[in-house]
Image (spheres, coloured by chain):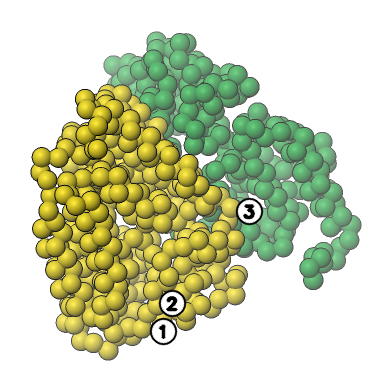
Amino acid sequence: MKVTFPHMGNVYLAAKALLDGLGIDYVIPPKNNKEALDIGTLHSPEEMCLPFKLMIGNYVQAIQKGADTIIIVGSCGPCRFGEYCELQMNLMKNLGYDLNFIVIDYPKDIGIKELYRRISQVSSKSNRKTYEKLKALSNSLKVIRLIDEIEEAAHMFAGYERNKGDCKHILNECKEEASKCRTSKEMINLLIEYKEKIKHVPIDINKNPLKIAVIGEIYTVIESYTNFSIEDKLMGYGVSSHRGLTPSWWVKNALLSPLKINSLAIRRNAKKYLPLQIGGHAIECVGEAVTASKEGYDGAIQIFPMGCMPEIVSKSILPTISKDLDFPVMSLVVDDMTGEAGYITRIEAFIDLLERRRESVLFRC
Amino acid sequence: MKVGIPKGLLYYKYHPFLITFFKELGADVVVSEDTNKKILDLGVKYAVDEACLPIKIFHGHAVALRDKCDIIVIPRIMQIKKNEYICPKFCGLPEMVTNSIENMPLSITEPIYTFTKKRLYRWAKSAGKKVTGNEFKIKHAFLKAYEGQLNYNAGILDENYDIKIALVGHPYNIYDNFVNMNLVNKLNKLGVGVETMEFTHELLISLEINNLYKRPFWTFARENYGFAVNASKEKRVDGIIYISSFNCGIDSVIIELIKDKVGSFPFLTLKVDEHTGEAGIDTRIEAFTDMLERRIVNESNIPTHG
């Protein structure tokens, strides 16, 4: 059995740590690229959303490298992400691949027994002791938490750094090195080292950079290929950015949601504009826009794939928030045909607009 | 008090309930006119660009009612059956409408769960309070409206036609004759009878659903899939026409599932949006009917690809 999984930002690092710890053979699909997107667009239903197409591309490229088992997560919300597994199974079968799909779903929908059975399909292939398996799981959670913290710090410090490009350089180096690690222990040590490094980047606290919140649909904000590395670009412009939706946030949210104590602040802030959970991450999007404006951010950028149902609702709410709180928000819609040049022009224009809202226009020179 | 009810989305399925309920409460019920070009244009103007056609049309109806009523009903239908949703846009419909259209009157936006009578009564109580203070009246109106809804069955079931097709899709596409450009009439004129999903027994639908790896969590996905697959399997119909609005997330999934299941059974997808031309639709349904006729004449039904 050779396991693979679709990409989503840095999740592959955590999955690598977990599978290394379990001693299971795995293939990491090549990072999202033009070819993966082309494969996905060719085979997927036309009106499907972008994440689906990229995932198909990931599978095909991983199969070419020998994978035969695919692990994905599911959901039963009203958003169509929950139906991905069924469609992808049919699609891959019709393409002639003989694959084993393992869908990790919420226990409230499939029952705890079924969930256990599905997980044991993977874990039974590992010859480690139960203690070691649990250790591997906790290590992988540690990895995802560390890499999210490093990323968050790098994005925030990018506006304050003394030597331009420091944060970007450290972050990219960190990701590169981490993917080369052989054991999860090694990876954790490396990440801790880089966390210290990013904390000690020389910064100028007197600078007052633009601060932008990146909000929107979880896959497109996390996966840098779909949003044309918007966060790297913002770092390059010397803009501090913050993104609330991270893989570690998702884990925490999923664990706390049965008790209904997940993301309380977001729900409190969103309540005035969107009182109910409508699926996807619409409530998070609205809540984060309000939070960002309260915390003194200069603006927010919403990113979502074309046709995303929950985000269309939040997009129609955002103009009201923008008006009420005097807070600029720009929405960017991405799909497989988005052109990078038009996209960058809009981001630059938005940053110019935010600068001009301040008194001094020339502070960045 | 004038209560406005927009003639969009699931109005076509639940209008007996809504109209009776507010009439019995003693309110003047104002229903917007049938969908027309003017309403569509208003909807396109006010709704968010990415929304689908039915949502835009609902916005149009809401704008048309804006100055004609004191309170407007924007049904936030969360779940019709337990653990089954309709679409995220339905859950956020009141927010979409009130944030996109200025100067909206007061609105009734309480979430609606219809899977038990008790849950629905909870909605009736909070919605009724905005019209009258008399709780007895609310209860009376609710019971009458509930009964009226139970006795109402929308579906279309034509008999005495040589060719029969299953018309599948969301109710607001099938029953809104402006959106589908009188599709049912056109089919009847071509000598094609139509059957819709309302006549397939719940058990048969569940039977088909159980063959799926994952239980669909959208009510209309479940019903449409179950009906289309069941009708094709039992050879009750000669072909399937799926009418879908452009960019509908649910249809993008369900069309694939049906196509995958029915294999080479005749299947036509009609996409509608605000730019759809009538001539194109006509040509397509005529061609589809011709194909069905030839299949019946040449009994062998051998597909061209062997």
- Disc 3 target residue: B228
Chain of the residue under the numbered disc 2 shown in the image: A
- Asked if the residues shown at circle 1 and circle 2 are in contact, with their CB atoms under 8 angstroms apart, the answer is yes
Of the 4 image quadrants, the one containing the C terminus of chain A is top left
The color chain A is rendered in: yellow
Q: Quadrant of residue B122?
A: top left
Circles 2 and 3 on the same subunit = no
Q: Is residue B269 visible?
A: yes
Of the 4 image quadrants, the one containing the N terminus of chain A is bottom left
Chain of the residue under the numbered disc 1 shown in the image: A
Residue at the far right in the pictured view: B297
Q: Residues within 10 Å of mark 3 (few under 14, many from 20)?
A: many
Q: Name the residue located 53 percent from the left edge and 44 percent from the top edge.
A: B248
Q: Nearer the viewer, mark 2 or mark 3?
A: 2
Name the amino acid, label 3. Ala
- Disc 2 target residue: A69
- Disc 1 target residue: A1
